Amino acid sequence: MAEEKKKLVESWSFLDTVESNFRPLVVIELAKGTKEETIEWLTKRIVDKKANGGAQLLIKPLVTKNGVENIYLVGASHLRLLLGAEAVGLVKECSDNSMRTFTYSSRKTFKHFADDNHNFLTMAECQYIIKHELENLRAKNEKMIPGYPQAKLYPGKSIVRRLLTSGILVQIFPLHDREELKKLSHSWYGRVKVGYQPLDDIRCYFGETIALYFGFLEYFTFALMPMAVIGIPYYVFAWEDYDKYVMFATFNLLWSTVILEVWKRICAILTYRWGTLLMKRQFEEPRPGFHGVLGINPVTGREEPVYSSIKRQLRIYLVSLPFVCLCLYFSLYVMMIYFDLEQWALDYHKENESNFSSLMLYVPSIIYAVVIEIMNRIYRYAAEFLTSWENHRLESSYQNHLILKVLVFNFLNCFASLFYIAFVLFDMKLLRQSLATLLITSQILNQFAESLLPYWLQKRYNRRMKKRMCSKKTDMDLSLAEQVNMEKEMGTYLGTFDDYLELFLQFGYVSLFSCVYPLAAVFAVLNNITEIYSDALKMCRVYKRPFAEPTANIGVWQLAFETMSVISVVTNCILIGMSPQVDALFPDSKMDLVLTVALVEHLLLAIKFIMAFVIPDKPRDIQMKLAKLEFESLEALKQQQMKLAAESLKE
């Protein structure tokens, strides 16, 4: 064991930082006017050996006729990437079809490995390794970034994060592989076809987080189809007979539980095959925007900023919480204005009784739907600012607080009017109309804002860039310079937050009021089919390529969907209890009706939780494989301890 470790250290020490076939993987853009001593110091740290505190990567400037434009291309030798794969804990498939953490010493045991096979690691994995190594470049004895005395450093501080917060580093992003992107685009969205998405190819190119989102989008679309098929005849033949919706609503409640539990199993299958189910979680570093007084991290022992949790809690409860409550109140105030408009439209229609007045009945709902989308987007910016101001140390904590703020506001903003119509006004006709208008309008606006508008703007920019690049004579390959300059001006993909939020709200529209508007699932399916193509288009053509992020599930969104399904049980039971047909069954005592509805609701919730408990989160074969790996790890640890004990006895 000691001999293997010594060889590995030697490999790190003597790794060649010059490679004839340089493959650019990551682009670094520095601010214009960055001082030469800063650039020289940064590039030296990037190429320096690991033993000296460097990243031991390859870097070269993007040179044009006008000289260096503060854009640098970063790559790595094949050996460096393999050692980096071990450092980040990538899990790969072995020759015996098992999944194991990659180690350089046992590289020959992994499937498809060969010393000359540079495709053993996917390009997404290579870019993730480079990002990890760059972010782990740490200050040693430097007190500041050379050339910028105001940009303070301390031992252990991430250099790249300090450069970002100081504005010296403008952006860092992975480069597209145009040939691979062309192949993926053709098989993904380049032609209209009936079939599954190439999730494995998406994962290899964009990483597991993006692939899981598209896997969930595809699965959710297929899962909606039974609801859509059943909803059509209910809509056509039984519009006002709410008692006939009892079976439909019951199916909806069981359906919402089953699809979420089955998704956990599918997610486990996918992430096991991709290796992320077995990846050990890396120790989280502080966020780039985190600040505080210099102190000692009790876990790592490193010097880093420390911020009082009491101050953070005061900011959350004395500022953020009141602000969120104020926004919720404003949302309810806007909702009441919407109901005033509804009443005005209804009065206008009663006075005129014309085709125009009939159309006017839908105008308030359309206006309200547009206002809701605008309010959601404005609130999102405010929530991001507040959550950043709360100064969370970890990115995961920041994301959880942001998601909670946004979910609460979006839920109230999108569904408060529907709850008010259903349980205060008791107007089922208006509920159907409002639900249909909100659902369809929000889907159209999202498609336009998220995909069509950015794509059109990007096409315009690309045409201008191509004309400008073709007018210049560069000393290097024109296509690479053109590609880098075009990609650096593309929008930055901010993650899957908005995409999951859109599906979450859609799930709410479908599940909360299923017994009132059975066609909701039909419109959701139609939207999601186009969503798959438009989201694929924006990933490949509109935004810069995001860095791959290993993940084993959809995270907090699973809990959000499950919470929505529990709320849907309550709303559907109350709606059925309010129907005239069910109400007629209890002519003498309304208390009996209330108790019966409560009993049915509790029974359905019990069935729901029992189903969630009975359906395993992971298939049995994967459970066995995980148990086997855990047993082998324990055995290996025992063998290692026995070997060390024997060596100590010999001494």
Image (spheres, rainbow, N blue to C red):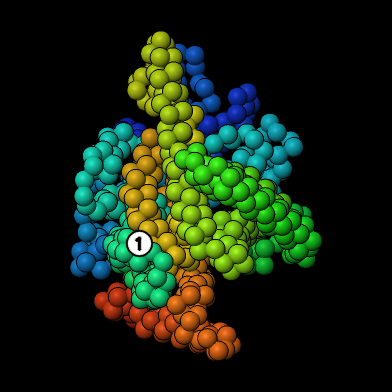
Question: Horizontal and vertical percent for residue 270?
Answer: 31, 63
| Quarter of the image where the C terminus is located | bottom left
User: Residue 83, relative to residue 106: is it above or below?
Assistant: above
Question: Horizontal and vertical percent for residue 573?
Answer: 48, 77
Front residue (pair 610, 543): 610
Q: Judge left or right: residue 149 versus residue 632.
A: right
Instruction: Name the residue that disc number 1 marks.
Output: 235
Q: Is residue 646 visible?
A: no
Q: Which residue: 70% across, 33% down?
A: 148
Question: Horizontal and vertical percent for residue 59?
Answer: 45, 34
Front residue (pair 242, 141): 242
Question: Horizontal and vertical percent for residue 507?
Answer: 44, 61
Helix, strand, or loop for circle 1?
helix
Q: Is residue 346 visible?
A: yes
Q: Residue 335, located in which quarter of the rendered image? A: bottom right
| Quarter of the image where the N terminus is located | bottom left
Q: Which residue: 40% across, 75% down?
A: 243
Q: Which residue: 35% across, 80% down?
A: 615
Front residue (pair 561, 248): 248
Q: Residue 146, located in which quarter of the rendered image? A: top right
Q: Residue 299, located in which quarter of the rendered image? A: bottom right
Few, some or many residues within 10 Å of mark 1 (<14, 14–19, 20+): some
Count of residue discs: 1
Amino acid residing under circle 1? Tyr
